[in-house]
Image (cartoon, helix red, strand yellow):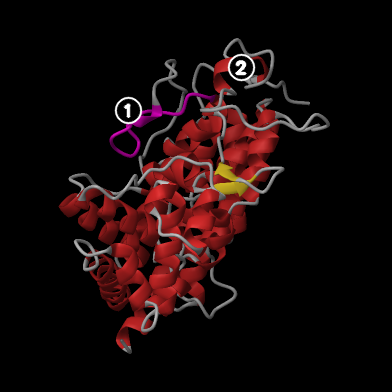
Amino acid sequence: MRELLFEKFATTEKNPRWRELTARQTELYSRGDDIRSPFARDYTRILHSYAYRRLKHKTQVFFNIDNDHICTRMEHVAHVESVSQTIARSLGLNDELTKAIAFGHDLGHAPFGHQGESILSEISKEYLGRPFWHERNGLRFVDKIELLEDNYKVARNLDLTYAVRDGIISHCGEVDENGIRPREELIDLDGFTAPGQYPPATWEGCVVKIADKIAYIGRDIEDAISLGFLGEEQIARLRRMAQAHDERVLNTTVIMHNMIIDICKNSTPERGICLSPQYFGQMNEVKAFNYEYIYNNPRFIAFQRYAGLVITQIFDTLLGYYGQDVWECLRRERRYCPALAGTFADWLAKYCQADFVPQGELRERAMQCENFKIYGRLETKELYAQAALDYISGMTDRFAVKVFNELLSY
């Protein structure tokens, strides 16, 4: 049996930073008979959140909402959880923590995948003066937006532990690095200003970071072949890449298995969470192949333009309500676009000061929420633009298309 080299560094009660890593922003309501650990409780809170449920209708790479066999954002999250849990157990780390981080790591993803993320980033830079990136938005969702009812049916913020929140904002898997090691400082997570700026604070977070990349590069190839994105020449190139490592195939199962085993064999507290030079080279080779033949494929141009049109039109429509009596405007617009106007009014009611929300059903909804009132009284255009951006970023592809189709018949 292999020695658990990382066991003494695991995020458990024996860890000297346990109290700080399990700290929450406020005091989460308690249940005297709860048998879960703090991280197991975070996992179930994420699992019950609406943001997690919506991942099943969010694009991973390929926009194919009617194809049940194309990877969605939710399936990708499950792959990341599977990879990270296997590695964590083998190394002696806390697999409850990796599970919670993995299930929460993509809660902030926009509709239409990275295309939607790019569009929202341009909107955010124009109206808020800063880019949009899903790791940061994920932290915003779990900290300020997602709500769960407590024992008394009062909606409250998720209030996750520091370690899980940290793993979400620091998970960026686009950076080509090997030998990932946790940072020493438990910094204010609002100090992140760019994806990949700081490594995670825990070894478990480092495992999720590399698991994210292992999960997506393999499955994306499988979907690309299924949808005809790769021709005979590209498939032959994949075979040559596989044969260089004595494999007959190069698919999701093979890539994941080989890289998981390689990480478990090569990672040490001194070297960090790492692949051997052989498999790190393969990871970068496969990733470069995917960018050349999949992510930058001309077949994505129509999708990119469509995603841009849908998101931009929804945002512009909502922004057009600013400067008027927003509540009256949304009430009036429900006659023509009930899905957009109705759900956006409900969105605002939950995050504005309750006495700013008009009397009636919306005020009652607001009174049921004891959460951060992040939009205040919509005092500025920036606050309103942030509300619209938050609202859109939480949409599924399906709902964004539904709302856009409403606007076509407006």
Q: Quadrant of the C terminus?
A: bottom left
Q: Name the residue under label 1.
A: 191
Amino acid bearing label 2: Trp
* Percent coordinates x, y for residue 154 in the rendering: 62, 46
Residue pictured at 47% horizontal, 55% vertical? 217
* Percent coordinates x, y for residue 240 in the rendering: 45, 60
What kind of secondary structure does the magenta stretch mostly adopt? loop
Q: In this rendering, would 267 be left or right of 321? A: right
Q: Residue furthest front?
A: 359
Secondary element at tag 2 = helix
Q: Which residue lies furthest to the bottom in this view?
A: 409
**Which region of the structure is painted magenta?**
189-202
Q: Which residue lies furthest to the right in this view?
A: 33
Residue pictured at 69% horizontal, 16% vertical? 13
Secondary element at tag 1 = helix
**Residue nearest the observer in this picture, 160 or 207:** 160
Q: Mark 2 points at which residue?
A: 18
